[in-house]
Amino acid sequence: MTATPTIRHALRASRSALAHVSDTPGLDAEVLLGHVTGRDAVALLRDDGMRLSAAQAEQYDELVRRRAAGVPVAHLVGEREFWSLRLRVSAHTLIPRPDTEILVEHALAALPRDRALRILDLGTGSGNIAVAIARSRPACQVTAVDVDRDALSIAADNVRRIGVTNVECIESHWYAALGSRVFDMIVSNPPYIAEGDIHLSTGDVAHEPRRALVAGVDGLDEIRCIVAGATRHLGTGGHVMIEHGANQGQAVRELMAAAGFGGTQTIRDLGGRERVTAARR
Ligand code: GLN
């Protein structure tokens, strides 16, 4: 029987095994080995001379093998951190991205702490945006909708796990199940990639649900629906904030202005690209 590797050895070996598939092979290896051993990055470093048990070594090899085949880390460990919250994700949901934290940050800046405002999150997926806002604004009521029942059950699970009591999850194609309800803020990270875009077949995106990503030939089909519906579901003075592709800022500002919203403003992401456009009714 050969000895199992030490933590240091296992990390080093998989870092090179993952270099072809990931921009962050070292981080991926740490997250996967952390998952297997129940240690965070600090503990992995501290205990790096320790040998894995045979069962841990086997489980880790299997995870690295699947990661090397392109499966996203978030799917392998079943969770992803967003807004410092550990959220469950599955193949039915988009994997929450740091870019979307910009939307949360901007939404919170427009939500005074003490006011009981009504917020609608369209296409909630894992519930990341809804839960992050609800947690930071306990006086507000957040309505999270998604058309996909499997995604919605992940969102509901995240609401329970994080322990927020001010989020309701509703199965709905955009506003369809909401009747004439009116909100003070509408937020969304909708599908905004154009059909046939080459990004759809690369990296994590290739493993994420098409329906959460693709929106017609110009990627704007769903944003058009959201903006059109916002004219009926947003109260006077209410905010609409939508995440979009880096080259869609102008189109989204024009859509919002054409729908009669004022004060359109686009916020850039960490890489300096136009990412979120907001306006007021
Ligand atoms: N709200 C989720 C997110 O931002 C899901 C978005 C989507 O499925 N398009 O990750």
Image (cartoon, helix red, strand yellow):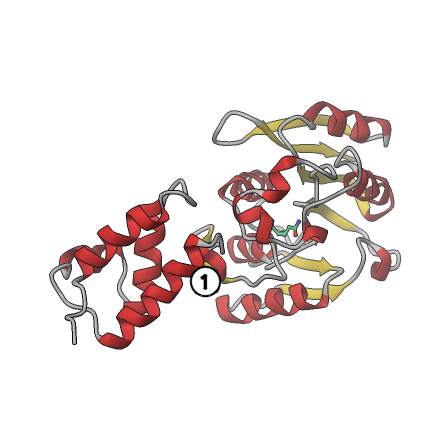
Which residue is drawn at the image coordinates 72% and 32% (left, top)? 279
Q: Nearer the viewer, residue 225 or 15?
A: 15
Quarter that holds the C terminus: top right
The percent coordinates of residue 162 (x first, y second) are: 49, 66
The percent position of residue 71, horizontal first and vertical second, equals 49, 56
Q: Residue at x 57, y 70 (%)?
A: 157
The reply, left or right, for residue 2 in relation to residue 163 is left
**Vertical placement of residue 263 versus 75, above or below:** above
Residue 183 appears in view: yes
Q: Where is residue 109, by image quadrant?
A: top right
Q: Nearer the viewer, residue 257 or 109?
A: 257
Q: In percent of the image, x 83 and y 48: which residue is there?
A: 233
Give the secondary structure at mark 1: helix
Give the residue type at disc 1: Leu
Measured as percent of width and height from the top left, residue 216 is found at 80, 40
Quarter of the figure with residue 73: bottom left
Q: Residue at x 85, y 27 (%)?
A: 258
- Counting the numbered discs, the total is 1
Screen quadrant of the N terminus: bottom left
Bin the neighbour count of mark 1 within 10 Å (Cα to Cα): few under 14, some 14-19, many 20 and up: some
Q: Residue furthest front?
A: 1
Q: Is residue 226 above or below residue 58?
A: above
Q: How far across and how far down the image is residue 53, in percent? A: 21, 74
* 105 relative position to 85: left or right: right
Disc 1: which residue: 76
Q: Residue furthest left?
A: 49
